[in-house]
Each structure stands twice: as C-alpha cells, then as structure tokens.
Image (cartoon, rainbow, N blue to C red):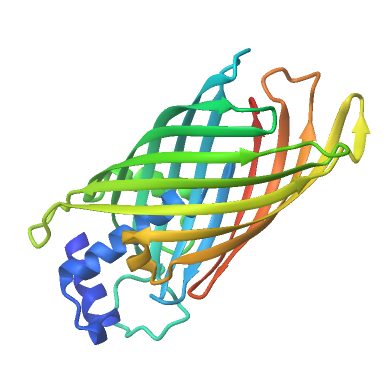
Amino acid sequence: MTIRFLIFFFTMSAFCVHAETVEEIAEKAHLANINTLLIFTSQDGLSSGRYNFTNVGVDMEVYKLPFTYHFESEKALNYFLIGNVGYSRVFISQEIDIPPSSRLNYDNHLRTYTAGLGGGVRYKLTEDIHFSGGAQLIYSRSGASVKQPDDEIGDAIEDFFEQDYNDNISYELLAIAEYKPVINNFKPYAAISYRLYETKSTFKFDELLSFDTESSVSRLAVGIETPGLLHYHGNYLTLEGYVNGNYLSGAVEKSVKFNSFSTAGAVVYWYTPGAPQWAGRFFFEASTVQSDGLDGYNIGVGFTADF
C-alpha cells in the first residue's frame, strides 16, 4: 500500500467535510508529523510522549534522544554541540468518528525519523545571566506504513528502508536568554527562548510538488531546583519543578490549529560529583502538556555531561 493510497483515503474519509484538496491535506499531515517532533519534544535526555491534537483529530507518538555538550572554557565565552535522533508516528485519533473505509488509523500511519547535529556559543554576562545562540541541521525521512497495533520500535526501524519515504531537511536557529541565581542554596531560574525551523521537503508522487515551510516557537520558562535533600557517599538528590508557556507561529500553528500551549513538569536529579567522571548528574523527568486543542505528556531519563 503506497502513501498515495493512504493520502487518498485520508482525504476522502476524514477531512472531506472541509472540502480541502489532496495537496492541502497531505501537507498538513506532513507538517504536523515533522514540526511536532521538532517542537514538542525538547527534554535533555531520552524522552517519549504522546500528544492528542483534538482540533484536528490526530494523535502522535514521539521518541527522541537529544544531547547538548558544553566545551570547558575559563573565559566568559564557550562553545557547545547540540544534536538529536528521533522517531514519531501520527494517525487519526480513535476518539473521533471515522468511516470504516478510512486507511489512516492506528494500523496505517505516517512515520518520521530524524537526526540532527549543530552547535552554538554561550556568553556569560555574569555568573547569573547567560545568553546562547546556535544552529542545527536536521535530516528526516517520512512515509506511510501499514502495521499492526502490537508493533515494536524495532519493527518500525526495520521498516525504514522498505517503504516509500520523503526526504526532508530542517534548519533550526535558536536564541536563549537565562537568569540563574543561587539563593540560600536554592536555584531559581527564568529563561526566554526562540527557535525557528525551516523545513524543505519533496513528496515522491506526482500530485504534490516540493514545498518549504517555516515554524517557530517562543518559550518563557520559570522553575526552581532545591538544595540537596538526600546525601549518600558524596552524591546527593535534588528536585526541580517548572512551568512554561509556549507560543507557536508559522506552518505548525496552521497544522495543529492552536497557537499556544503550557507545560508543567518535575525533575529528580542525582548528582555524582565523584564518579562516573563522564556524567555530572542523572535525572528522571515527567511533564504534561495542555492547550485548547492539545493534551499530552512526556517522560524523559538521561544524564548531563556538562552544565
């Protein structure tokens, strides 16, 4: 079964009431798949999540492993590397009324694989105020697949070279301003960030031409980390809570049909100053995502190599 067949039934059965063309429907599904994977997962470690876009009747599952590494420097200026690998799949929500002829459902869906690498520079104006800027090149492949509900991720990866996929290139530009004081061993913080994504994509069937899309997300985040609450052989545990507001613009806003969402989360850190030397701390993170048109969650685990 080809992506042409999936898009045809997706158009005719799920969105025909909106009188949209094949090109418009395919572009929306494609953009939602790519841009959501890039924008809605921004944890520092291995993360997985699920999002229900209620305004468009689409569900998405995401799995992502991003990383950031700061090079040591005794100066106010230092360089860092950023990168990621990820996987997502998007399908029509089972909560909405779908005709039996629909082919884009839990079994038949669009999936996207991504890998990115980039870098940037951080400037410490003071010990408490930091400014960062950088860029990342992200390659992704997206396509249709027909599988069963009990698939494992390994089956999805095996399917990578067996289906008709579309190649996509995304450019991410980022700018971050942070205020991170230390007050009585508590570490409150506030951060403002802006990320711009431009995606270039080419569909591999005749009905659609290549197109460019641009999406951005602005974020205001506040949080606080406690002092050490539990100590063991020089290691110690802390807790962090945070909330942030996110504001969307561009193609992603049109795809998901809302322009803002909020996130609230909690993190457990286990600091290991002695050993292992390659990790400063390990963490477990859980967060929820809410909006008028979105509900979801993310769970992440990982370590910080340099912070």
Visible in this render: residue 174?
yes
- Location of residue 285 in the rendering, given as x and y in whole percent from the top left corner: 68, 48
Residue 149 lies, with reference to residue 236, above or below; the image says below
Q: How many marks?
A: 0
Give the answer, above or below, for where 76 lies relative to 22.
Answer: above
Q: Residue at x 39, y 34 (%)?
A: 135
Answer with left or right where residue 267 lies relative to residue 99.
right
The percent coordinates of residue 189 (x first, y second) are 70, 44
Instruction: Give the quadrant of the N terminus.
Output: bottom left
Residue at screen point 51% across, 75% down: 292
Q: Residue furthest front?
A: 125
Tell whether 52 sits left or right of 5.
Answer: right
Closer to us: 76 or 244: 76
Up-down relation of residue 202 to residue 175 (above or below) = below
Residue 146 visible within the image: no
- Counting from the top left corner in percent of width and height, residue 30 is at 29, 59
Q: Is residue 208 left or right of residue 89?
A: left
